[in-house]
Each structure stands twice: as structure tokens, then as C-alpha cells.
Image (cartoon, grey):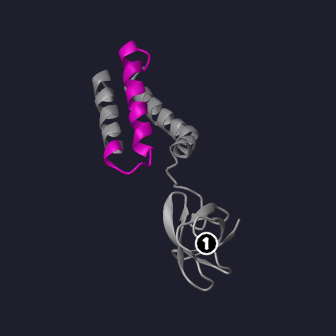
Amino acid sequence: MAWWLWILLGLGLLFVEMATPGSFVAFFFGISGLLVGVLAVLGWAGPEWVQWLLFSALAIIMLGLLRGPLHARLNLKGSSKPVDSLVGEGGVILEDVAVGGVGKVEVRGSSWSARASEALEKGRRCRVERVDGLTLWVRPE
């Protein structure tokens, strides 16, 4: 196959990868096509059957070795932190929290509804004990 067809195939596969969600399968086949195109220009790719063998082997090797680390590097699987990760965080009481009542607390720069087992006055530092829906249970620090 002509070298420019390998380059077009590689660029086409890279375009397919950009148009689809990041599975990085077409990406490695696209890179493989570009590499075979470069090898064909240099005259190192050999006959057509060797070019197809190189294309397949390079793509599968890169897919096996580089896909996992690339996913991890780009954090495509999302955060592994649970939603309740506010437990243990410090905050400041924005509105007085009466025993059994609801007040406001600021944690990580956001305002939350808060409940406490004891009365807490405005301006006092607190610590999140648990998360109950959108309400934080806090205790004094």
C-alpha cells in the first residue's frame, strides 16, 4: 500500500478517536497507521503483507502497554472519592445552630445546611461528623 494511504488511514483513525468518547482504541490504531506510513516512506516497511502485519502488531502492542497508563494519567475513570468525603473536614458556622435545629455552615467554600447535637454559635469552627443528604452533622472543633 502506498505510504500516503497509511498516513490518511492514520489521520482518519485519529479523527474517529476525537469524534468518539475516549476509549483510546482508534487512537492507537491511528498512531500505528502513521508509523507504518513513515516506515513506508523510508522504504523500511517491506511488501504490503508486512505493512499490514506491522500495522496490526504495533497497534495491539501500544494498546496493551499504553492504554491503561494513559487512562490513569488522564483520570478518565473519574474520582474515586466517595460523595461523603466531607466527613472530617473543617468549617465555620455561618448561622447559629440550635440543638435539634438547622443552621448554616461553610465547608470548602460552600454553604451547607447544618445540624448539631449541641448549640453552636456563629463564627465558631466546627468539624463534619457525617453527611445526611444535603445536611451536614457537625461538632465543635
| x then y, percent, for residue 66 | 55, 38
Above or below — where is 101 with respect to 40?
A: below
Q: Residue furthest right?
A: 141
Name the secondary structure under disc 1. Answer: loop
Q: Give residue 8's quadrant in the image.
A: top left
Q: Residue at x 51, y 41 (%)?
A: 63
**Quadrant containing the C terminus in the rendered view:** bottom right
Res 82 seen here = no
State the image coordinates of residue 96 (x, y, percent, origin top left).
56, 75
| Magenta-colored stretch includes residue 80 | no
Which residue is at 66% across, 66% downward? 127
Pointer 1: what residue?
121
Q: Main secondary structure of the magenta part?
A: helix
Measuring from the top left, give residue 132's x and y in whole percent: 57, 77
What's the residue type where badge 1 is placed? Glu
Q: Quadrant of residue 97?
A: bottom right
Corner quadrant of residue 3 = top left
Q: Which residues are magenta?
A: 18-45
Q: Left or right: where does residue 132 sit relative to residue 24?
A: right
- Of 19 and 129, which appears nearest the observer? 129
